[in-house]
Image (cartoon, helix red, strand yellow):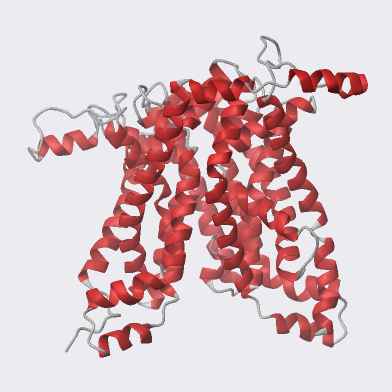
Amino acid sequence: MSIRRTFTRPARISAIAPYLWMALFFLVPFGFVLKISLSQTVIAQPPYAPVFDLAQGWAAIEAALAALSLDNFRLLVTDNLYVLSYLRSLFVAAVSTSILLAIGYPIAYGMARLPRRWQGLVMMLVIVPFWTSFLIRIYAWINILQHDGLLNKVLIALHLVSAPVVWLSTDSAMYLGIVYSYLPFMILPLYATLAKMEPAWLEAAGDLGASPWRTFWLVTFPLSLPGVGAGILLCFIPIVGEFVIPDLLAGSNSMMIGQTLWLEFFTNKDWPVASAAAVVLLLLLLAPLWFYDRLQRRQLEDAR
Amino acid sequence: MARAPNRISPFNVVSLALGLAFLYLPIVILVIYSFNASRLVTVWGGWSVRWYAELLGDRAMLDAASMSFRVATVSATSATLLGTLAAVALSRGERFRGRTLFSGMLYAPLVMPEVITGLSLLLLFVALNAERGFWTVTIAHTTLTMCFVAVVVQSRLGALDRSLEEAAMDLGCGPARAFLRVTLPLILPAIAAGWMLAFTLSLDDLVIASFTTGPGSATLPIRIYSEVRLGVKPEINAICTLVIGLIAMVIVAASIASKLSGARGDSAAPL
């Protein structure tokens, strides 16, 4: 046992550099977001009034505290544009995650039942699109979905529709893009739990007279719940803040919060409102993030 | 007699085949159309490489590609270094002070919406008065991708038989030597896979790069995005095909690297 301990100390020392890096570039920046979200918008470069300037000492801090304003947050809860963006984001994320689960589960289940020697190859095939560019994969769909694109040509050739259907700039296109992009994130955790399942348990259920259908619902599905949870969180959390997919595929009449934030920041140059929008988004995601962190930790620490 | 419940059924095969077709068909169509001779992206005019030739004359696109490659190379390398250190600390450091915060900071960016990460890093760079461009994007990408490297390497370290390290130390190796001579060679495939994952993630990122870059230094995704917003163009099909080809080569290299080092293929795979 003493050997383990000698390896432990250098391992702890190796935490220092990544620790400092993440503290500086991940944790500290949130402080700035919070600070700017409480400051006033001005037309300047950078476009916000500094909340305080440490160089001027205590008086400046006092003045700054007095100037702190919740105006940006008040705007967020009273202006319908923002409230609707948040609601739409949560709704879109919930619907897409459900579709992902419904599509991803059968695929992961099929993978887990393949002969062992095939599983590695098929897993690689599922992972490869995850390595290919997000943007390019969405762009590939624009190719297919456009007015005289392949999908409409096929549908017309099959006499399913008589005139081209409008696909681009619709919610259906957005859902399609989201499901397409996030599918590997749903499949992989599901596959990981399904592949670990003991065939003997399923045989036992079968021997005891359960039909395959009942075996699935009574044994397989409950045992795969950790994978289901991981898949749901891995998809739901980033989809809520998604920007690229709704921007390129959905119509412009209703926006998700990622788009609203982007618009405030890049077009309206209203950094304080954009920061406040980010703070509220983070608050909404706090609970799922906490679950995700617990799950991730348990998974990796079990392997340790 | 009831059917054996763990045999593969036609339903399993069909769902797998449909799933894989869904994942690959759009990419295959994109690649085919990049070789289309016609300027109209929806009309097939025969095979041609003219859009690739036109890309060579597109100065802005070439500059963006060069910027992206430099950012991806530098950020993947620093992310691999930091991510591997983090993975070693988490899987071999037992309990230490601030461990919960440390692992939380490493796992959160994996799912954190990119608009939040991008905005917060930008505000930090503005507060530090840093000139925005190559270095700010590189730092931002290092921060994001080192977390992916850490997860990939940590799962490999977790699967490793620790008695090998212990044996080396029983035979008189110091901890540093035991790590360098025993552990490091064994996790090298995961480290290589981590580097390649970091490289492709950096090459792919649009949102964080848009926030953290400055005027005049667009990355390839920023350039592609601004073109895509204007509609489908054959040149974009061509540049996308080139990027896909490059990434395919990286993946083949990764699987060869993991085969050569004799590791089981699945343990070197990302995630």
In the picture, which quadrant includes the N terminus of chain B? bottom left
The residue located at (73%, 65%) in the rendering is B88
Vertical placement of B203 versus A119: above or below?
Answer: above
Q: Quadrant of the C terminus of chain B?
A: bottom right
Residues B160 and B190: in front is B160
Q: Is residue B231 left or right of residue B119?
A: left
* A187 relative to A50, above or below: below
- The residue under the point 70% across, 80% down is B162
Q: Is residue B144 visible?
A: yes
**Number of residue marks:** 0
User: Which residue is at a point 92% across and 22% down the rendered structure image?
Assistant: A57
Which x, y percent locates residue A12? 81, 64
Q: Nearer the viewer, residue A88 or B170?
A: A88
Q: Residue B209 in the image: x percent, y percent?
A: 61, 33
Q: Residue B93 location, x and y as percent?
A: 77, 68
User: Would residue B29 appear left or right of A191 to someone viewing this image?
Assistant: left
Residue B178 position, x and y percent, is 81, 76
Residue A179 visible in the snapshot: no
Residue ID at (26%, 67%)? B13
Q: Is residue A130 above or below residue A226?
A: above
